Amino acid sequence: NAGVMQNPRHLVRRRGQEARLRCSPMKGHSHVYWYRQLPEEGLKFMVYLQKENIIDESGMPKERFSAEFPKEGPSILRIQQVVRGDSAAYFCASSPRAGGPEAFFGQGTRLTVV
Amino acid sequence: RKEVEQDPGPFNVPEGATVAFNCTYSNSASQSFFWYRQDCRKEPKLLMSVYSSGNEDGRFTAQLNRASQYISLLIRDSKLSDSATYLCVVKRGNQFYFGTGTSLTVIP
């Protein structure tokens, strides 16, 4: 059973470009969470999704950021018109529908905006 | 008030020492509790769940006090490989709340 898969592992974008981060949850997991971690800081919640539904996006900036988790395929975190301040590690975690309440993390995508 | 608060440390301890981390949470409706470990530039990994009765996994012991809304992690006989950031995590409904982490360095 493969773990949570994130790609790319590293992403470099110029200011103003778009960044698309992908997350495939563990098999059988239907809950996906996205977190951002700035250097030397803790994990900050961004968005919680279930298949085809955004459940809680209270941690997501109102502009330029969006997330989806389609019926088929990975969850996508999209950042439009990136700025230097978007440079961070973005972690995805997944949790099963039932049982085992813990969340399992992917290895993260390190976004660098130049 | 933050959902989860931890002493950020850093804790620098010699090999073989016993070290304890504390954590408090603000919402009494929180249902599940965990300690995660995060190595530098890596993803957080589940260390152990925390139960009201207390639980132990080798050198690691976790305790939960629901009345005080307090969680602890005790590491005995510290190893160099224990050096990491330890994250206190609570779950309420389907949402996870992370502390900012406590940094531990075990010194030879």
Image (cartoon, rainbow, N blue to C red):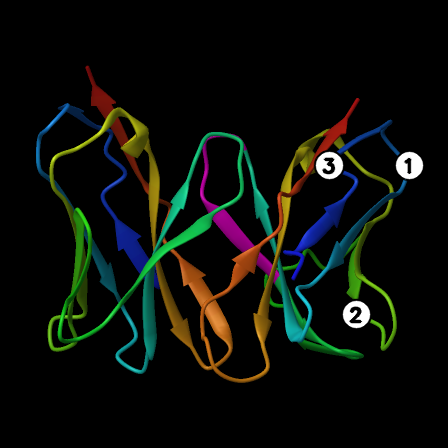
Q: Secondary structure at mark 1?
A: loop
Residue nearest the observer in this picture, A111 or A72: A72
| Measured Cα–Cα span from mark 1 to mark 2 | 22 Å
Nearer mark to the viewer, of 3 and 2: 3
Q: Quadrant of residue B55 in the image?
A: bottom left
Q: For the magenta stretch, what is the residue range?
A: A39-46
Determine the residue located farthest toward the top in the rendered image. Answer: B108
Residue at x 42%, y 63% (from the top left corner):
B97
Q: Earlier in the sequence, mark 1 or mark 2?
A: 1
Q: Is residue A79 left or right of residue B54?
A: right
- Image quadrant where one finds the C terminus of chain B: top left
| Residue depth check, mark 1 versus mark 3: number of the one nearer the observer | 3
Dot 1 crowding, Cα within 10 Å, few <14, some 14–19, many 20+: few
Of the two numbered discs 1 and 2 in the rendering, the one whose residue sits closer to the viewer: 2
Q: Secondary structure at mark 2?
A: loop
Callout 2 amino acid? Phe
Residue where numbered disc 2 is placed: A69
Q: Position of residue B19 (x, y in %)?
A: 12, 39
Q: What chain letter is assigned to the residue under label 3?
A: A
At 45% from the left edge and 43% from the top edge, which residue is drawn? A42
Query: Is A45 covered by the magenta stretch?
Result: yes
Residue B86 picture location, percent across and down: 32, 44
The residue that mark 3 highlights is: A9
The residue shown at (77%, 34%) is: A83
Q: Chain of mark 1?
A: A
x and y percentages locating residue B1 in the rendered image: 32, 62
Please check whether the numbered discs 3 and 2 fall on a single chain: yes
Amino acid type, residue under disc 1 in the picture: Gln
Residue B16 visible in the displayed image: yes
Tell me if label 1 and label 2 are in contact, CB under 8 Å. no
Q: What distance separates the C-alpha of mark 3 from that of mark 2?
A: 19 Å
Residue tagged 1: A17
